[in-house]
Image (cartoon, coloured by chain):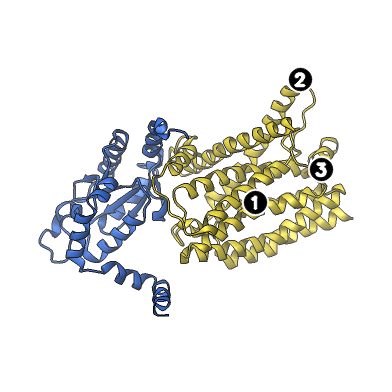
Chain colours: A yellow, B blue
Amino acid sequence: MMETALKALFILLYATFVGFMFMGIIRIVTARIHRRVGPPIYQPILDTIKLLSKKSNITHGVIYDFGVLYALGATILAIMFIPLGNIGVLRAYGDLILITFLLEIPMLGIMFAAMSSGNPYAGIGAQRALLTMLAIQVPLGFAIVALAEFYGTFSTYEIVMAQQVSGWSIAHLPLLLAAIAYDLVLQAMFGKEPFDIMIAPGEISLGPMVEFGGKHMGILQIQHAIALFAETLFFSNIFLGGAVVTTFASPVLNTIASLAILLVKQIAVLLVATFMGAIFPRFTIDQAAKFYWKWPTIIAALGAILASL
Amino acid sequence: MVDWRLFDPLFEYARKRSMWIVSFCTGCGGIEMPPLATSRYDFERFGVMPNPSPRMADLFLITGYVTPKTLKRIIITYEMQPDPKYVLAHGSCPLNGGIYWDGYNAIKHLDKYIPVDVAIAGCMPRPEAVMDGIQKMMELIETGEADGWKRYKENYEWYRKNQDELFGEGWREKTARRWIPWLMDKKKEVKEE
């Protein structure tokens, strides 16, 4: 019991810290692509401290407060289900579907809060976020089906273990197709550029985020950090082979090596998303929905069919 | 309970190094913002980030001359920001009217309506001058001298009196009715019932 609690605490702290570093990396890499110097890597932590130390706070009711906490809670629950090297707290048979579901729940929480604030920009942003979520469901579902069909299991842990024997998922053609589709979906889940329709700064003033300030925004920053960590971790677990190192005698060394390997894979996933985000302009919502229902769906469906053959 | 005063130096440092600006690009100063944000002068080095929403903004940039129409928006946007908040007036127009010193429709002293922490002189100030102003603002935040938001609370009567003299009583309700008619009308209906 004590050990599980310690593990959960460790995962939470590690995910938050690395997530903040990821946010810093995104900002620095984007700045370098723009030929700027960019902020220091710990800038998101300073932002969060500043937001949490605001002296006045504006609330718009119970749902407004609850939605923010709901988003944070769902993200923390998701991170507990995803195997982090050989540390895992919660494990269930169908957790492949559960994690996919839990990674989208935070957006719903933010939408509750945004819509209860009554700001028209927040309403438009929430509508757009809902439409984007609707658009990404189809390729996401096909990609998950392809995975489950190929490995014959819905358990993330077993998929990671199977990859230690048969090589990375993306080495197999059907799963490579699924991975490409999932990576395109990941772009919308990060809210990066071609699909940042819901937050669209300068067009609809950050969309759902427009009314958040002070401590609410601080909690959302923490949530965003953990969500970044969780999404990249999930991708590197199911497609990039995860990391289960057993070469060393000491379990601590094994854990550190697994975490390091996972970190490299996560940063690779993150950088692909950042590069795509830095060079593409923004889609409109109908273009995004058409895109998702056409190309990633075709690719992922092809992968699912090939996997079941 | 934790005594949060212990962490005040950390908070001041974070406030200094992470100013999110909402810029009110009224006059010609708005054109100085793109060079500041892009690769030539890059103010993101100091954690300054342009932000469209007043709710999460710290630094309020007023870039250019102010007319009574825009002043209404400035006051309401300023009051929407959570404390602590800072105001940086940009150019000589908000200071003393600038070239509009005898204009019938320009506000000569912005300081009478909202507290200004740092004012940059010039017509227009070059991006270097604005960077200098931002540096000055960072110094003031660290030493705790940027207390415009405190002054606004303490002297609210005086600021309110000046604003009402210019716009007439009840201007907030009138403006709000124009901006958010559905909200104001609903309140009215409830009252009538």
Q: What amino acid type is highlighted by mark number 2?
A: Ser
Q: Foreground residue, B137 or A181? A: B137
Q: Which mark is residue A186?
A: 1
Residue name at image x 41 percent, y 55 percent: B53
Nearer to us: label 1 or label 2: 2
Local secondary structure at mark 2? loop
Q: Secondary structure at mark 1?
A: helix
A266 on left or right of A249: left
Residue at mark 1: chain? A
Asked whether the residues under marks 1 and 2 belong to the same chain, the reply is yes
Type of amino acid under label 1:
Leu
Q: Position of residue A305 (x, y in %)?
A: 84, 58
In which chain is the residue bearing label 2?
A
Q: Are marks 2 and 3 on the same chain?
A: yes
Which disc, if any, is residue A30?
none
**As drawn, A145 above or below A255:** below
Q: Is residue A45 above or below residue B185?
A: above
Sequence-wise, the earlier of marks 1 and 2 is: 1
Query: At 78% across and 44% down in the image, what residue appears?
Result: A156
| Residue A307 screen position, x and y as percent | 85, 53
Please give the name of the residue rendered at 46% of the width and 33% of the height, measured from the top-left corner: B2
Left/right of residue A210 with respect to residue A70 in the rendered view: left
The residue at 45%/41% (across/down) is A47
Verify CB contact (< 8 Å) between mark 2 and mark 3.
no
Q: Earlier in the sequence, mark 2 or mark 3?
A: 3
Answer whether residue B113 is visible to the viewer in this image.
no
- Distance from disc 2 to disc 3, alpha carbons, whole Å, reads 25 Å
Which residue is denoted by mark 2 in the rendering?
A250
Instruction: Chain letter for mark 3, please.
Output: A
Amino acid identity at mark 3 = Ile
The residue where tag 3 is placed is A159
Q: What is the C-alpha distance between the residues marked 1 and 2?
A: 35 Å
